[in-house]
């Protein structure tokens, strides 16, 4: 099965949002023909995250009524995906903005740390320079 066809859409309920925030667990509606291995590969490939385990739940169709008309709600297959602590899936635009800001701040802090040279590094540079000057005088 094609990786793009495995995951249909995320389940955005109160229970799934609590699990996503506290336990790093995501819930997706998946294709009826998929299995755990295909779901794991698809999530890892699409979202570039590390998946720890996958649980799959089949829901049968349910009877439903709309006014005087009766019918059924569709049957679905849900996958509950447990991610590694360092991994995160961004589902909303505001989360993407926050993640982008955090990465930019981390890059700025890293660049600032690279620019600041410690005293030990300065002393080592002076010793190397003096050793090079002595070697140059000896060779003359």
Image (cartoon, rainbow, N blue to C red):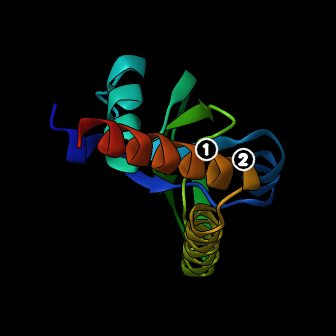
Picture coordinates of residue 3 (x, y %)?
Answer: 22, 39
Q: CA distance from mark 2 to mark 1?
A: 6 Å
Q: Is residue 56 visible?
A: no
* Label 1 environment density (alpha carbons within 10 Å; few <14, some 14–19, many ≥20): few
Q: Quadrant of residue 101?
A: bottom right
From the viewer's perspective, tell me whether residue 86 is left or right of residue 104: right
Q: Is residue 3 visible?
A: yes
Q: Is residue 36 above or below residue 9?
A: above
**Residue occupying the point 59% across, 55% down:** 11
Q: In this picture, is 54 found above or below 21?
A: above
Which residue is under mark 2?
120
Which residue in the structure is indicated by mark 1?
124
Please identify the residue farthest to the left as the structure is shown: 2
- Drawn side of residue 18 relative to residue 28, left or right: right
Residue 27 point in image, percent of width and height: 59, 44
**Helix, strand or loop at mark 1:** helix
Horizontal arrangement in the rendering, residue 17 relative to residue 102 (left or right):
right
Instruction: Give me the disc on residue 96.
Output: none
Task: Classify the position of the N terminus by image quarter.
Answer: top left
Q: Nearer the viewer, residue 67 or 78?
A: 78
Q: Name which residue lies at 58% across and 69% down.
A: 115
For label 2, the SS is: helix
* In-front residue for pair 106/41: 106
Foreground residue among 25 and 139: 139
Marks 2 & 1, CB-CB < 8 Å contact: yes
Of the pair 62 and 50, the residue shown nearer to us? 50
Q: Residue at x 49, y 57 (%)?
A: 71
Q: Residue at 60% of width from left, 63% of height from top?
A: 110
């Amino acid at each position: 099965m094609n990786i793009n066809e495995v995951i249909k859409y995320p389940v955005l309920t109160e229970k799934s949002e609590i699990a996503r925030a506290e336990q790093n667990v995501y819930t997706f509606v998946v294709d009826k023909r998929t299995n755990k291995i295909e779901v794991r590969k698809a999530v890892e490939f699409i979202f570039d995250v590390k998946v720890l385990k996958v649980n799959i739940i089949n829901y049968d169709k349910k009877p439903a009524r709309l006014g005087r008309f009766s019918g059924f709600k569709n049957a679905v297959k849900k996958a509950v995906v447990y991610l590694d602590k360092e991994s995160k899936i961004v589902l909303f635009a505001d989360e993407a903005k926050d993640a982008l800001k955090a990465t930019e701040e981390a890059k700025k802090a890293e660049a600032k740390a690279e620019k600041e040279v410690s005293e030990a590094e300065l002393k080592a540079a002076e010793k190397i320079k003096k050793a090079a000057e002595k070697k140059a005088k000896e060779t003359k």
